[in-house]
Amino acid sequence: MSLVNRFLRKGRVRSAKRRLGASPTPKNYAELARECVQAGDMSSAVKICEEGLDQFPGNQELLRLLERTNELYREDHIRGLQRELRDAPRPGVWRELCRVLIQAGRVDRAEEVAEQWYRETRDGEARLSCAEARVERFFSDRRREDGLVAYRFLEETQSLLPRDPRPQRLFLQLTSRVGAWKDARRFAAQLLELVPGDPVLESRFRTLMSLAGHAPTFEQALREVERTGRLADEDPEGPESARPHAPETGSIRPLLQRMVAAEGVAAAIYLRGGTALVQGPKGATAERTARGVREVIARSQSASRRLGLGQPTELRLEGDFGTLLLSPGESGAAAMWTTTRSPSERDKALLRDLAGVDDREMEQA
């Protein structure tokens, strides 16, 4: 930015501050935050948004601006860390870059950075960052292979950092969330050896003792997570449920049949973990259709993470084949293929309900 532009930007920031001082409204908070962004002062922009939300909780404009400003701040921070690595690579900078990338949802990129760090240094901190990224990917996509790779990374980290409790804590989190209670109990016991006397951890260990009786192995638990698309702490019958209720497949099939009976609908698909229900196509064609829809969703989610855009809630493909509308959500994924018409708003709402997409997220998107 030229000297003249910097001077002009500072003048605009001062003017916006005066307007805010004279009239502290959500609009003036937002204008000052935008001027700070334009001036390249991301940290001030974030603070202004947070101050505005303290005064006007729930204001949608400030919430959206804070989210976007935080994204810009992270991107600016990432670029700065990348420059620092080129100039003077050191463990603290590698570690911070991996942390910020994971925080931004760019777990694939975080793992690439951690792998490069590990190749160059064979540092246990680098392997820990690889494990953290792969654990986040597993929690997001629920793929068995990701869980196995995360476990292997943690085993390698444990051998490199034998007295560090962080690998054990991540082991405990991973095995607990998939419902492998025996493994979780073992890691809790190992963690207690490293940090004896922790009352929270001791309570956790006692709980795991009561759950470990007929618990599945880690690999069995991973297969169940991949099949159902649901982690153990997201059981809709339990008090800790954090996800919308996943409809039973028995109630979904008639709904898909009604959907595909409508004019212009060639296929209706529901996916959850390893389960796929397809109405319209038959036999091998139905299997190919389900695999294709699953791949489109997986690749779109992966691309969205790399771009730092978060989780997609609606995907739309158009071409000579018609329109394919997909809704990846919390309890599964739903899709509709129409050939002679565009999906209606009612169709979209139905797919969102099936997939467990929160309409409030759609309003904010």
Image: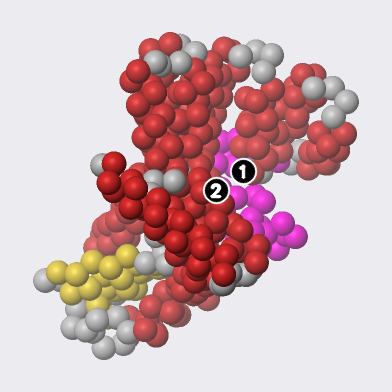
**Which residue is the extreme one toward the left?**
320
In the image, 256: left or right of 207?
left
Total marks in image: 2
Residue where numbered disc 1 is placed: 178
Looking at the image, is 278 positioned above or below residue 34? below
Residue 11's quadrant in the figure?
bottom left
Residue 74's quadrant in the figure?
top left
> In the image, residue 132 lies at what x, y percent?
53, 32
In the image, 302: left or right of 245?
left
* Residue in the foreground of this view, choosing between 117 and 190: 117
In the image, 170: left or right of 295?
right
C-alpha separation, residue under disc 2 versus residue under disc 1? 7 Å
Residue where numbered disc 2 is placed: 225
Is residue 357 visible in the rendered image? The answer is no
Q: Secondary structure at mark 2?
A: helix
The amino acid at mark 1 is Val
> In the image, residue 184 lies at what x, y percent?
70, 34
> In the image, residue 339 lies at what x, y percent?
19, 78
Looking at the image, is 124 positioned above or below residue 55? above
Residue 191's quadrant in the figure?
top right
Is residue 38 visible in the rendered image? The answer is yes
The residue range painted magenta reads 215-244
Callouts 2 and 1 close, C-beta under 8 Å: yes
Q: Is residue 237 magenta?
A: yes
Other-residue count near label 1 (Cα within 10 Å), few / some / many at <14 / 14–19 / ≥20: many
> In the image, residue 72 lies at what x, y percent?
41, 48
Work out whether mark 2 precedes mark 1 in sequence or the reverse, and give the earlier one: 1
- Residue at 22% in and 73% down: 323
Other-residue count near label 2 (Cα within 10 Å), few / some / many at <14 / 14–19 / ≥20: many
